Amino acid sequence: MFASAAREVVFANPQIAKIVNRNFIPIALKAALVDRPPSGIEGQIYQRLRDSRPAPQGICSMDSQGRVIAWSLGFDQEDDIGNFLAHIQKKFDERRSAEDEFALKAERFQVFPTQPLPAHPCDSTLFEIPSSHPDSEKCPSEYAEPGGTLVGRVVGRRADEDGVLTDEIKLQENYMEARVTLAPAIQKLFINVARGSGDNEFEMEPDVARAIIGRAFLGQLDVDPFGNPKGFMQEEELQLRSQLISTNQDGSLLFRIRGTTHVRGQQWPNLQRSNQLAWSHRVSLRWTGYFTVQGDQITSVELIGKGSERLLWTNPQVVAKSYSQTKHLMAGHLIDFDSPVCYGLQMKLP
Amino acid sequence: MNSLRLLLISIFCFFVSPHAQAQQRDPVAHWLITPNILLEHKQELKLSPKQIEAIESQARGVGKKTQSLQQEAGGLRAKIDTQLEQVSGDESAILEDLKKLTQLETQMRLIHTQALLQIRKQLDDDQAKLAREIRDQLRAKQQAAPSPQANGQAQKLKQEYQQFQRGLQQLAKSIEGPQRKLQMLQGGMQEFEQFMQQGKLDEAQAHLGEMLRVLGEPEGKAKSRQPIPTGGSSKKATGTDRELAPLPDYSPEELKREYARIYEEDVPWREINWRTCLLEGIAESKAEQKPILLWIFIDRPIDDERC
């Protein structure tokens, strides 16, 4: 939730984006790396983040020695985002001329500037920090898919009753993008059934269908109707059919894909307790498109899905009258829509 | 099957006499508090957001660490179960499996205890004391003699639970890989446990009824009789309540055009040129004399696009 709110409220603000690009070196880091720092000097810098963090996720700043300047988890008002950046800039300049570097402290704010948390003493050891990873070493932030994985992207947008796509694209409940991958084992599942079907139409295996359309939903990660079913209900009806329609000049096979998918995730109906969030998400889509298969590999996927989506996501905090999302980035905001939607999916071998 | 076995064992504790467990004080159970009690009473305990995050993180960590162990232990229990069913079972094989099972259970208990210790470190002494008091009150409530009405309800609950248990066993035996439904029911049972621990029999019964309904539905074709909560929205219902409109058979070129119509290159959050390597970022900060701005969050912020 924090990440989605930070992107919507902080980094999608054009003025903030301009300041960040001009005055800062922006780095996006995985909380998991802060949780479990890698080895070496880089790990020691991650450790500084871990030691000083007020929460596992947040917005933070560092100087050129990898020492934390300040953390913040929220901002009183929209203007305070810019004020926080200016504050960091000032502290950064002060540090460059600091006489006693060992007296430095990392500032921390629950909400900037009115809710400071106790400052954290800086580890001021000056490391010889390498400027990059040696060729023989992979950066821990890099993520590589296993060989043969088909990689692509699904994009989705809300539309009105006439099918006109919304122009409001800042919020993920209106416009989304997500990475989609198809592992070799899943591809094999499809190809095995296809081989046994000749040119007859066949039903796609649920695991293949799930891998293909499983990220086609609006909203932040937390509202995934396919998500981890622990603690809530998840229901699905996946009926995607495929049929070989032609052989291309290069010998690859073209399959037409058609079908419908209905997915719903929601809390157990009896659990909507006052102190917990309320969540339900249904996505119903009709799909059409193509798979291209070369040998034992799916080499491309192109699909369009159209239908409707109903999403409710809320908690008592976000509906309180005094609530400000800038102040409580962790809490997110109320989402409540029932709307026509369109999705497009493209995948190809990297 | 594995998770099912564990699930049944964890739930069974609600129907056995607590006196059997209370002969000698278990120091871990006495001094350490489970995360569900802390999180359920977070306001009363005045837990800070950081404490809540840390407790939740520990609880999640235990799940991850014990998942494969639980599966292994479940497999062993099933094997022992089958062996014991046969009067002429191989005694040495059974004892060997029991030994392995005991080792796994010890390993899991250590992981749980380690997490509980970490959670204890998150609390100050007053919070820990209050949490123990709350837990003891809950235990006392559980052990108090129920009213005749509650007795009847408990009896009904027990019968429904036994029905659920039989259904779950059948599900695990009859279908290969009903993992999603099993996981879902396991998650639901955790909520059931919480209701039971809190003595909320009405909620527990309603919840068990819903799980029985889900249990009765075929895998992957489940249809809920429960309407989706509307949250007070007055918008008209769509989707499964009305037919999905037909789609034309787009040619590959038309599909590309449709995709391009939905995709938006110029989104505001793409304006910032995020780096992902900390070392390279620090080097750049030195070279350009600019501070580093870090956005730290769960999952893959840049390459995964959704957050």
Image: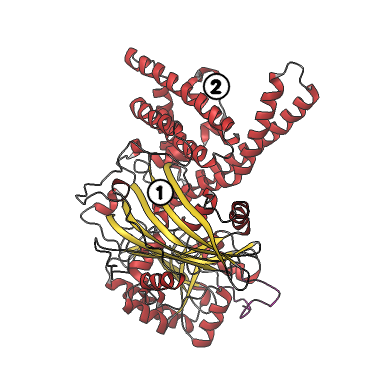
**Residue type at the position of mark 1:** Val
Question: How far apart are the two marked residues, 2 and 1, measured between alpha carbons?
Answer: 44 Å
Determine whether A181 is above or below B41 in the image: below
Q: Which labelled disc corresponds to residue A263?
A: 1
**Callout 1: chain:** A
Q: Residue furthest top?
A: B148
Residue A132 is one of the magenta-drawn residues: yes
- Do the residues at pointers 2 and 1 share their chain? no
* Label 1 environment density (alpha carbons within 10 Å; few <14, some 14–19, many ≥20): many
Region of the chain picked out in magenta, as a range? A124-139
Rendered image quadrant of residue A235: top left
Q: Is residue B180 visible?
A: yes
Q: Residue furthest bottom?
A: B288
Front-most of A302 and B28?
Answer: A302
Q: Which residue is mark 2?
A: B21
**Callout 2: chain:** B
Instruction: Identify the element where label 1 is drawn.
Output: strand
Please identify the quadrant where the N terminus of chain A is shown: bottom left
Q: Nearer the viewer, mark 2 or mark 1?
A: 1
Residue A131 is one of the magenta-drawn residues: yes
Residue at point 48%, 24% (across, down): B14
**Residue type at the position of mark 2:** Gln
Question: Is residue A346 shown left or right of residue A149?
Answer: left
Question: Is residue A56 shown left or right of residue A16?
Answer: right
Front-most of A94 and B72?
Answer: B72
Q: Is residue A121 visible?
A: no
User: Residue A204, image x and y in percent?
Assistant: 52, 51
User: Residue A221, image x and y in percent?
Assistant: 42, 57
Instruction: Identify the element where label 2 is drawn.
Output: helix
Please identify the quadrant where the C terminus of chain A is shown: bottom right
* Label 2 environment density (alpha carbons within 10 Å; few <14, some 14–19, many ≥20): few
Prevailing secondary structure of the magenta residues = loop
